[in-house]
Image (tube, rainbow, N blue to C red):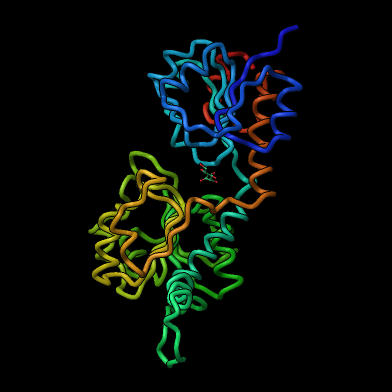
Amino acid sequence: MTQPAILVTRAIFPEVLVQLRQHFDVESNQDDVIWSPQELAQRLQGKAGAFMTGTEKVDAGLLARCGQLKLCANMTVGYNNFDLAAMTAAGVLGTNAPDVLTETTADFGFALLMATARRVTESEHFLRAGKWTRWSYDMFSGAEVHGTTLGIVGMGRIGQAIARRAALGFGMQVIYHNRSRLDAAVEASFNARYVGKEELLQTADHVMLVLPYSADSHHTIGATELALMKPTATLINLARGGIVDDAALAEALRDKRIAAAGLDVFEGEPAVHPALLTVPNVVLTPHIASATEGTRRAMAALAVDNLIGFLVHGKAVTPLNPEVLARAGA
Ligand code: 8YV
């Protein structure tokens, strides 16, 4: 019996390919070439499924050219690379990789918060440049983290894991803003208070963005919102580029309208707004919040489970548009 054909769009752990080859005829991209949309469409010809990393756009134009495609399995929790409505219309299932990266990503949220508030990278650059000639009482004086107020925008799984660290580990007061309010018992578990976006921005000593990207969340933080924040506050973007207006943020940082920012994601990444590279009070990391070997393996494994589950057994583990499953009678 011939096996279904699938495409692995980016380089991945070799063991993942070994496992996939037990079930599928696999075309892979271990040289990690970044394909144009045209090349991606061409490579997807005749493929029933795709293992994706969240960097490949799946839209109506691509789907119109890939009639045999049934499943796009992201190894990421975010899925703003998918036009889900177009996928549903085309009868293509999308899956993501939630849960397995929650704690690792929350750890990194704190790494970025601590590095930003306590000026870790800025002071390290100073030291490496040979500028440290003597100790002084106010050298790289930063912002307090413990006991302060953390404002979390987006209180999903990762937001809640950050809130737990903040409340139980750092004695912080947690305020949050979200599309919907959490159950009282969940709120109570990290003593969190639901507030409007304006109040959050005005009150928080540190603001952490952990919401998904969509047309609605585009530029959730722009010049107007930055103007509401305390001049001593820090802003952390752990979620997606485009949630922050990076040009407006660079200006606010340059003019010290807020104290500092920590960014793991950027509008138009891997390009970074050039003005952000010129301000010292920002910590910049290349989208690595989930990057530990164990977590990246778990993310890949969930995408594999979705591919095998759906294309071999008719059942996906983490479907994003389950109406496609219902229609297929799965
Ligand atoms: C990914 C992420 O590593 O899962 C997500 O949504 O943001 C990260 O964990 C990243 O998206 C790779 O493109």
- Of residue 30 and residue 153, the one placed in the foreground of this image is 30
Left or right relative to 283: residue 230: left
Where is 295 relative to 79, above or below? below
**Quarter of the C terminus within the rendering:** top right
Q: How many marks?
A: 0
| Residue located at (66% from left, 36% from top) | 302
Q: Is 52 on the left or on the right of 177, as rendered? A: right
User: Can you name the residue that lies furthest to the front here?
Assistant: 130
Q: Quadrant of residue 268?
A: top left
- Residue 128 appears at what percent x and percent y? 48, 74
Residue found at x 50% / y 70%? 114
**294 vs 320: above or below:** below
Nearest the camera: 322 or 207?
A: 207
The residue that appears at 38% across and 40% down in the rendered structure is 214
State the residue lying farthest toward the top: 1
Image position, residue 139 (x, y; %): 41, 86
Q: Quadrant of the N terminus?
A: top right
Residue nearer the viewer, 7 or 238: 7
Question: Can residue 154 be seen here?
Answer: yes
Q: Residue at x 55, y 14 (%)?
A: 327
Residue 107 relative to residue 219: left or right: right
Above-or-below relation of 122 to 22? below
Q: Quadrant of residue 60?
A: top left
Q: Is residue 141 visible?
A: no
Q: Where does the image place residue 248, in percent across and percent down from the top left?
A: 25, 57
